[in-house]
Amino acid sequence: MNRKGLIIVVSGFSGVGKGTLMKELIKRYDRYALSVSATTRCPRPGEENGREYFFVSNEEFERLIEENGLIEHAGFVNHYYGTPRKFVEDKLSDGIDVILEIEIQGARQIKKQYPDAVLLFVMPPSAIELKNRLIGRGTESAEVIDKRLKRAKEEAVGIEDYDYIVVNDDLDECVQKVHQIIDAAHHAPFRNIDFINTIRNELFEL
């Protein structure tokens, strides 16, 4: 049975630890590739262009949209984020699972284009813990933190659109759980129609 690459969409409230979770998943398993998104926001301390994000201007981002160079894009807290198309489709062709860390709006766009995509939403153990993590980052003003918490209230309405939720309380356990979910998703019958039909045909030929 040939293994086809899947798009794995990972969303979650700002501050829930999505980035740390994805980096650890990539480090432990060689079957995943993390898609690097384009964004119009400025780099945070320690971030590098082409590693965490492709940092682009508003004009460059709008040109990517016009040229159909993004498979999804969305606005978030006064900035734009989007996923470059070529990288994703090249990896899928090679049988690699591509992880997209994007917001709910973008996740819905992905599901329409790629019905096989697996949608995961990362949850905090509690709302208080989420607020504490945002404050603990020490990278944003109280005003921006309030905006992110307000956005979290809006996003909480769309969680039911996802295939799975995972609680990021213990990082090690969460990484293992995400890997198990993705592995199980590969074995869903609707993602293996070609293999099923091959076996059916062989049975009729016996």
Image (spheres, rainbow, N blue to C red):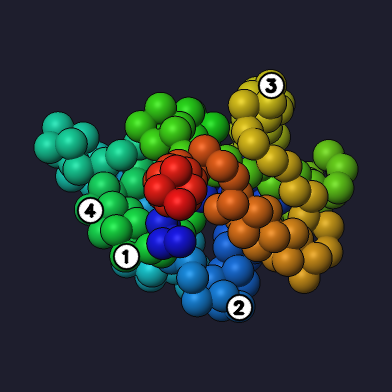
Residue at x 45%, y 52% (from the top left corner): 206
Amino acid carrying mark 1 in the image: Asp
Amino acid carrying mark 3 in the image: Val
**Of pointers 4 and 1, the one earlier in the residue sequence:** 4
Q: Residue 157: which disc? A: 3
- Residue 146, can we see it? no
Q: Nearer the viewer, residue 28 or 3?
A: 3
Residue 157 picture quarter? top right
How far is mark 3 from mark 4, CA to CA? Answer: 31 Å
Q: Residue 28: which disc? A: 2
Q: Is residue 153 left or right of residue 77?
A: right
How far is mark 3 from mark 1, CA to CA? Answer: 35 Å
**Of pointers 2 and 3, the one earlier in the residue sequence:** 2
**Of pointers 3 and 4, the one earlier in the residue sequence:** 4
Q: Nearer the viewer, mark 3 or mark 4?
A: 4
**Of pointers 1 and 2, the one earlier in the residue sequence:** 2
Residue 34 picture quarter? bottom left
Q: Are dots 2 and 3 in contact, CB under 8 Å?
A: no
Q: Nearer the viewer, residue 84 or 131?
A: 84
User: Can you say which quadrant of the picture contains the N terminus?
Assistant: bottom left
Q: What residue sits right under mark 1 in the picture?
A: 94
Q: Residue 86: which disc? A: 4
Q: Is residue 138 left or right of residue 45?
A: right
